[in-house]
């Protein structure tokens, strides 16, 4: 399946990444009107890190074939673990708020840097020096930059130490490494997935497995990409809390020094702030995800509305508008102002969890807002989406989740993927 528009998506600063358009697949009234709803409890089949989501699980399938999972539960940040390995964009919307709340300022300022390394051979990520220095001493993230998962060879290093290669048939045969057919390659297999566990006990410098992989990537079929890199080192973070600001940036300086012989560039996420005036918002009740006529809106109605708001689509529904006839679902209320923040870059889950914690703290004092939202988009061209699930581009490469956090710390969790991807775990 080819990218339909054939264009590479842009991400500032000076990057071309794979950002998703926000909720693009549910912004049409047709998709909304044909939603099929399957209700059902799932109290035993969820994984351990999803025990916060056991109260309600609902699955919605849009007419475009996209899958949306909705959970409702009482919020507990300590039990939430983002299963998206890295994210391209994070947005939060706070009604009845006109500026960045004080409780969020330090978190936003501390999103840190990530790095772009040009022409990096893949075998350098397999070298035991790199594994010992980064993979085994924190969470290391890497993603090929300016590649398309349905056309090019791509790679990703996950925080659990697994290196994922998505390669075409010719490359796979030349490498000679064990893999499996891609689920998106069709009847005639033209793409393969190779998984290399860098933390496996049998993958040490003297082992046959390590030498075989290193030889394949260095001698037999050298692979080289531009990579986005980030590293989360808990030991350095503990040092920060003890020493203060003086130790800030230690993770970055280590990556910079390690790849000093390569062309490496430090980048910061792009952060934008907007104050939306006289915004018409749907009325929500935390204990009623399905909504009730004339009382509250449903989760899918909110999802659709939020897509329009985050794209700053005009919701006036004027007859003269040729772009959109969409309007806010009813019942609704008009808020004088709402604060919207969007962060774009190579964003790791640890930073998102910190932001999530502070958003919950926002309701620590009385607020006019009854709810707020946090929306996270994974990379459209990442070879994996949730955990180690293979990711397919299909039409848009969607993989995202959205939190609706209520004043009483109830929450809704909405998770969406493309039509051919596995449902989020």
Image (cartoon, helix red, strand yellow):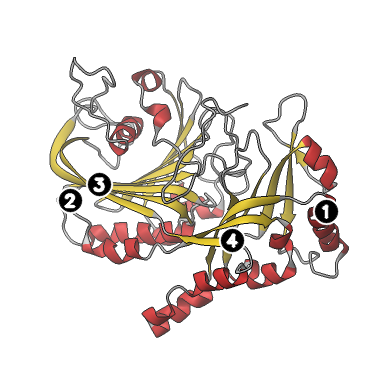
Q: Is residue 231 above or below residue 92?
A: below
Residue 340 is left or right of residue 145, and the answer is: left
Q: Which mark is residue 97?
A: 2
Residue drawn at point x = 23 percent, y = 57 percent? 363
Q: CA distance from mark 1 to mark 2?
A: 55 Å
The percent position of residue 300, horizontal first and vertical second, equals: 36, 31
Find disc 1 in the rendering and name its residue. 216
Query: How far is the residue under mark 2 from the one under mark 4?
Result: 43 Å
- First in sequence: mark 2 or mark 4? 2
* Mark 3 or mark 2, whichever is nearer to me: 2
The x, y position of residue 76, in whole percent, is: 39, 58
**Residue designated by label 4:** 263
Q: Please state which of the two labelled residues, at mark 2 or mark 4, is closer to the viewer.
A: 4
- Residue 371 is labelled as 3
Question: Do callouts 1 and 2 mark residues in contact (Cβ within 8 Å)?
Answer: no
Decide if residue 131 is on the left or right side of residue 55.
right
Picture quadrant where residue 102 is located: bottom left
Q: Is residue 308 above or below residue 217?
A: above
Q: CA distance from mark 4 to mark 1?
A: 24 Å
- Taking the spot 74% from the left edge, 47% from the top edge, the residue there is 194
Give the foreground label among 4 and 1: 4
Give the mark, 4 or 1, whose residue is nearer the N terminus.
Answer: 1
């Amino acid at each position: 399946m080819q990218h339909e528009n054939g264009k590479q998506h842009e991400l500032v600063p000076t990057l071309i990444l794979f950002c998703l358009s926000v909720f693009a697949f549910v912004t049409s009234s047709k998709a909304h009107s044909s939603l099929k709803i399957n209700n059902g409890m799932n109290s035993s089949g969820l994984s351990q890190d999803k025990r916060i989501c056991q109260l309600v699980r609902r699955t919605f399938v849009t007419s475009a074939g996209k899958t949306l999972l909705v959970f409702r539960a009482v919020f507990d940040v300590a039990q939430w673990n983002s299963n998206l390995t890295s994210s391209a964009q994070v947005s939060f919307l706070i009604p009845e708020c006109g500026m960045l709340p004080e409780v969020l300022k330090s978190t936003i300022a501390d999103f840190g840097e990530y790095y772009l390394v040009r022409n990096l051979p893949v075998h350098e990520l397999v070298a035991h020096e790199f594994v010992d220095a980064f993979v085994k001493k924190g969470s290391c993230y890497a993603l090929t930059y300016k590649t398309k998962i349905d056309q090019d060879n791509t790679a990703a290093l996950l925080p659990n130490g697994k290196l994922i290669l998505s390669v075409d048939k010719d490359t796979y045969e030349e490498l000679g490494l064990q893999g499996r057919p891609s689920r998106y390659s069709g009847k005639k297999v033209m793409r393969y997935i190779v998984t290399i566990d860098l933390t496996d006990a049998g993958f040490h410098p003297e082992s046959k497995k390590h030498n075989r992989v290193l030889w394949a990537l260095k001698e037999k079929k050298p692979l080289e990409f531009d990579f986005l890199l980030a590293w989360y080192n808990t030991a350095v973070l503990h040092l920060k809390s003890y020493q203060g600001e003086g130790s800030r940036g230690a993770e970055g300086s280590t990556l910079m020094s390690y790849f000093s012989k390569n062309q490496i560039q430090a980048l910061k996420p792009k952060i934008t702030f907007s104050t939306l005036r006289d915004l018409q918002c749907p009325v929500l009740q935390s204990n009623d995800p399905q909504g009730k006529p004339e009382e509250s809106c449903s989760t899918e109605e909110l999802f659709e509305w939020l897509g329009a708001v985050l794209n700053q689509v005009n919701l006036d529904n004027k007859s003269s508008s040729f772009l959109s006839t969409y309007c806010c679902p009813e019942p609704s209320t008009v808020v004088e102002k709402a604060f919207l923040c969007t962060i774009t870059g190579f964003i790791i889950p640890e930073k998102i969890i910190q932001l999530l914690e502070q958003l919950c703290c926002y309701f620590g004092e009385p607020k006019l807002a009854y709810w707020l939202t946090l929306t996270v988009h994974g990379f459209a061209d990442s070879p994996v989406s949730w955990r180690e699930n293979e990711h397919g581009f299909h039409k848009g490469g969607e993989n995202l989740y959205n939190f609706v956090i209520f004043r009483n710390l109830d929450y809704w969790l909405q998770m969406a993927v493309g039509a051919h991807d596995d449902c989020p775990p």
